[in-house]
Image (cartoon, coloured by chain):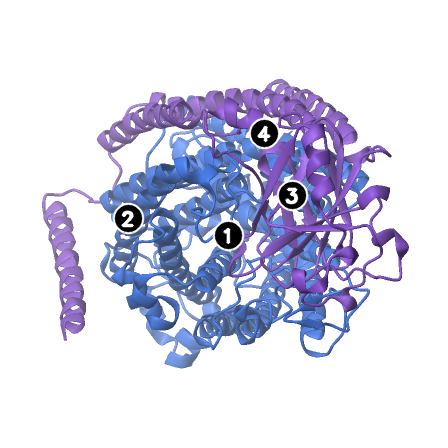
Chain colours: A blue, B purple
Amino acid sequence: MSMDTHSHSAHHTADHHDDHHHHEESFISKYVFSMDHKMISRQFLVTAVFMAVVAMVMSTLFRLQLAWPDEKFAFVNWMLGDTWGKDGILDPNMYLALVTIHGTIMVFFVLTGGLSGTFANLLIPYQVGARDMASGFLNMLSYWFFLLSSIIMICSLFVEGGPASAGWTIYPPLSALPQAIPGSGMGMTLWLVSMSLFVVSSLLGGLNYIVTIVNLRTKGMSMMRLPLTMWALLITAILGVLSFPVLFSAVLLLLFDRSMGTSFYLSDIHIGGQALEQTGGSPILFQHLFWFLGHPEVYIVLLPALGMASEIISVNSRKPIFGYRAMVVSMLAIGFLSFIVWGHHMFMTGMNPFLGAVFVFTTLLIAIPSAVKAFNYITTLWKGNIRFTPAMLFSIGLVSTFISGGVTGIILADSTLDINIHDTYFVVGHFHIVMGLSAILGMFAGVYHWFPKLFLRMMNKKLGYLHFWLTFICAYGVFFPMHFLGLAGVPRRYYSNTAFPMFDNLVDINVLISIFAIAGAFAQIIFLFNFFYSALRGPKATENPWGSNTLEWTNGVGHIHGNWHGALPEVKRWAYDYSKPGKAEDFVPQTVALEDGELDEGAGVHH
Amino acid sequence: MIKFLVYVALVLAAVAVAQIVRVFELASVLKGGKPNDITENDNKMNGRFMMLFMILFYGFCFWQVYEYGDKILPESASDIGLETDWLLWFNMLIISVVFLVTNGLLFYFAYKYYGRDNNRATFYPHNNKLEMIWTVVPAIVLLAIIFLGLKLWNEIVMTPPKSDALVIELYAKQFDWTARYGGKDNTLGTVNYKLITGTNVVGLDSADQKGWDDLIVRNEFHIPKGRQVSFQIRSRDVIHSAYMPHFRQQMNAVPGMVTEMHFVPILTTKEMREKTHNNKFDFILLCNKICGASHYNMQMTIIVDEPADYETWVAKQQAFFAKPVIGMAN
């Protein structure tokens, strides 16, 4: 396919007329079974937006329940029907199903598949200067496995017994035994099938991303000239390739326990008036396998967002990213450490406390590269000439949530302090801010910033501002107060807190959180409108609207099969020569040659 | 029909908004502007919003501390709680400073350096000395945090319970707890999950003589003030978690395993009622690991007695195997 592209582009000259001559492209091969990274990127994005809306509506349903537990809501009945929302009151099993699927969709389908799928596909060939991904076919399969897995996950919402309800971490035995919770019947089977397909999608995509970045960099694009987005997506893909297979094995063993009578995770269980035969298994084994994926997964979600924020903050501060090499080293360190910290999710499982102590040490080490990154972002703003595009606002928001959520991680990583706040709302507040918000703000930033490359049009600026400020205010309004609930001892995944008089004086906090949550959900309508309206009707984008240095802004205003007419661009310098003294413009694209004696900043050598 | 009309109205509203946006954009283009170019005014406005946001956000944080500060972390009623609470506030102080300072710098710089039309940013790609400082300083602070944390972890969790600690088993199932005392020998008898019946809820094995004096209690259990209690935690079905927020202690209940936690209660229920001015106050054990539909109401009351009162209570309990089976039916 890549060969085709080369000869095709070589035949034609670089006039616009050219675009109409893709006569071999039928509608199906262009829009449906496309192997073009730009189309696949948009397919991922639109699918992820749909999934995000589903997960967000779920969160408003359970927020209604948490704030007003005995209230009847016609909305609840309308959404869930009489089985799960009789008289407008949420069923406790459905509550658990909603939090489970909300978490699953947000973590995997929106912030892994959606975030990496959209931006790795869009940006990798564009920013390294390649015609397309290394394998367009595998890339297409990656999307179709993702779509299939999304469809199965959505179907699981409609089966008898409801969808999986054992929490997004699906700890057995709860997830293994339909006797324990109705969602562990057909719903859980579909969850496992869906996630297996998701792992396939993630591996096909990840291998492609790695190979493309390593092998298909254009002439002059040394590793130390890669934009930080590329470093972030490369490390993310490596983490995914190394950790998702472990989730797959965990899922496989769980399937065996569920349907073939094995006892990998089950032992000494008496349920539903019956003693099960399985003995000798360990539920803790599942947790080790799950979190061996689960913790790198946090960084799979976070790193692409941080990488995009590096790029966006630098472009819009009109300054080089501060400490480029420190940023690369920090991301590598975070990526490495993320594989040896999984046990901090398991301090209270009865795991050997000495092992716990080791995990305390490794986990707290992650704070060092994270701190370096935060300080480097802040220093990039210092003495900048900041242009507040909506993308820039979201990126600054990301840095703020990365800090605010990161510091509470220091409390949770300390096993001694984790004893009392483990599995409370403190944890919910922490990971939603540091991982959920940072990643989703980064994803919004990416959409606003690269919209001209995605849909060749501009998003509406004013709606973008409105969307950012409402989202940012509501986001902190939802998740910051949760720390107080957690310190008071309120456990997560409680259908209501009314059974405990000690929580009665905390009702106000839950009402406050829910009001912010619902307002925040409505604010997303602004985004959805802006997104679809601008994609179809927005003003046409120019070639390089933000004055960026990177290669994706050097190939005209259309989508070209093969990305560049004629020869591929050649890279002469790093991506961050913004406001360089002695230059006429405040940006110097990567394709402009270094002058004699000019410092090649990324590599640190003089020309 | 009404639903249908609502949908139609929503679609029409979206179309109307789209047209309005379109009109604004076209009008702006006619005036010679580019509607989505960022102007100095936009920068100034958003820079100011950054400062305003910072003030409101910090205000919101302080308001919450003021409003909810006395409702979080209920008075600690165990020996370990006193130490962990101190460590918590120590760490909280460090992270609060970091949180306020770094967020403050972020929002302040965003405001101070908003883009002006005839201004140019300072080219400042790196500074090794500065980067070294903010690598080393956090590293030192973290080492202190790690040291203090692990020191306590060693005392609280890694040190096994004393040999004379009162042994109590907490047996979890969907959706309640059962407590079992070792009886006069303070030793728990052997159990087997296959022996579980409607009356023998923990599966106590009558072949083991150590179990003959075991006491089994439901709904609430008593512990004496001032004596270390070692909880042996088990589960019958799925994973649960034994969480006692007032004693700052928690441990999962895992089927197929026995887990352990221990502490010394330092306040009786009566003393706690006086301290909290709440004569209905009770210590509770609650489930803190998702376990099914009634997870949110899986609790047991804990009564801390003066040692003498505790002895009186224990004396009134009957050993499981000594009880007539009929009396156990509930």
Of B65 and A335, the residue lying toward us: B65
Q: Which residue is mark 3?
A: B221
Horizontal placement of A229 versus B85: left or right? left
Determine the secondary structure under disc 1: helix
Q: Which residue is mark 2?
A: A523
Distance of mark 4 from mark 1, alpha carbons? 37 Å
Q: Are dots 4 and 3 in contact, CB under 8 Å?
A: no
How far across and how far down the image is residue A148, in percent? 50, 74
Distance of mark 1 from mark 2, alpha carbons? 31 Å
Q: Which residue is mark 4?
A: A371
Amino acid, disc 3: Phe
Distance of mark 4 from mark 2, alpha carbons? 31 Å
On residue B296, the disc is 1
Q: What chain is tagged by disc 1?
A: B
How far across and how far down the image is residue B94, in percent? 57, 21
Does residue B75 show up? no
